[in-house]
Amino acid sequence: MANSSIDVIEVIKTRRSIREYLDKEISDTDIKFLIDCAGYAPSGLNMQPWGFLVIKNRYMIRNLSETSKKSMIPLLEDMKNTSKAAAEYLSFLKMKGSDMFYGAPVLVIILGNKNAPTAVYDCAMAAQTMMLAAQSIGVGSCWIGGAQRSLVDENLLKELGAPEGYIAVAPLIFGYPKGKPKAPDRIEPKVVWVK
Ligand SMILES: Cc1cc2nc3c(=O)[nH]c(=O)nc-3n(C[C@H](O)[C@H](O)[C@H](O)COP(=O)(O)O)c2cc1C
């Protein structure tokens, strides 16, 4: 295998969802680099229907965490008896002062153009591309799906600064990782070979 392929595989396999960050900003130049990389993701009809809302204002991130916690807690209450992960996440969110965004210095919400039929898939592709690019320059990341329910509110999205005509698809946090979390075990996927 060529060396360049090995590098990509290394990045894919070492990327982790980071939930503890150093108190260190990420430069605008590095964020621009990650956005540029995200733009190389494939997209349906090559519509490239993504937009990037970059929030570096820590006060706004904390506020969004509080709003998102309020919309997630009732959902998790309904799930807590059937899912251990939901029960654990619920007790974390109910903890006083807990931050859904783990104190990360930047939140990037990948926005999908409402007019593109495959915007959600396209933005998810852009999200993974961006997180892998981040890993390659030593920046940690995590997709915060917990914020999704609050972000369906168009007024909230507008208040955050999103342009008209977009929905929130992927709320991603970025920052320099504090430590190196162990990879959660991978489940053997169901694979069907048809030859
Ligand atoms: C759509 C999606 C939503 C997620 N939402 C959250 C979240 O709200 N909070 C969180 O801490 N991690 C979240 N994660 C991260 C997953 O928990 C993580 O990817 C998974 O545990 C595997 O760990 P790894 O990313 O380190 O391989 C989310 C991941 C995806 C793809």
Image (tube, rainbow, N blue to C red):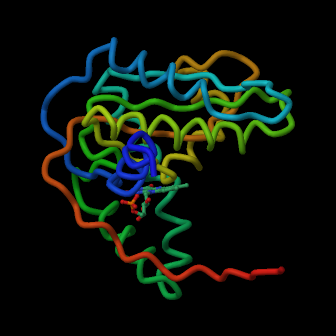
21 lies left or right of 38: left
- Between 140 and 6, the one lying in front of the other is 6
Q: Position of residue 41 (x, y in %)?
A: 63, 33
| Residue 45 occupies quadrant | top right
View quadrant of ligand 1: bottom left
Q: Residue furthest top?
A: 29
Residue sitting at x 32%, y 70%: 91
Where on the picture, by quarter, is residue 174? Answer: top left
> Image quadrant for the C terminus?
bottom right
At 33% from the left and 19% from the top, the residue drawn is 30
> Count the marks: how many?
0
Query: Dividing the picture into quarters, in which one does residue 122 lie?
Result: top right
Q: Is residue 8 left or right of residue 160?
A: left
Residue at image point 36% right, 35% down: 134
Closer to the camera in the image, 112 or 190: 190
Instruction: Find the residue positioned furthest to the bottom.
Output: 81
Instruction: Name the residue at the front extreme.
Output: 1
166 is higher (above) or lower (below) than 102 = above
Q: Nearer the viewer, residue 122 or 65?
A: 122
Q: Position of residue 78 (x, y in %)?
A: 56, 76
Q: Is residue 132 above or below residue 190?
A: above
Residue 57: x and y in percent read: 32, 21
Left of 48 or right of it: where is 91?
left
Q: Residue at x 40, y 23 (%)?
A: 55
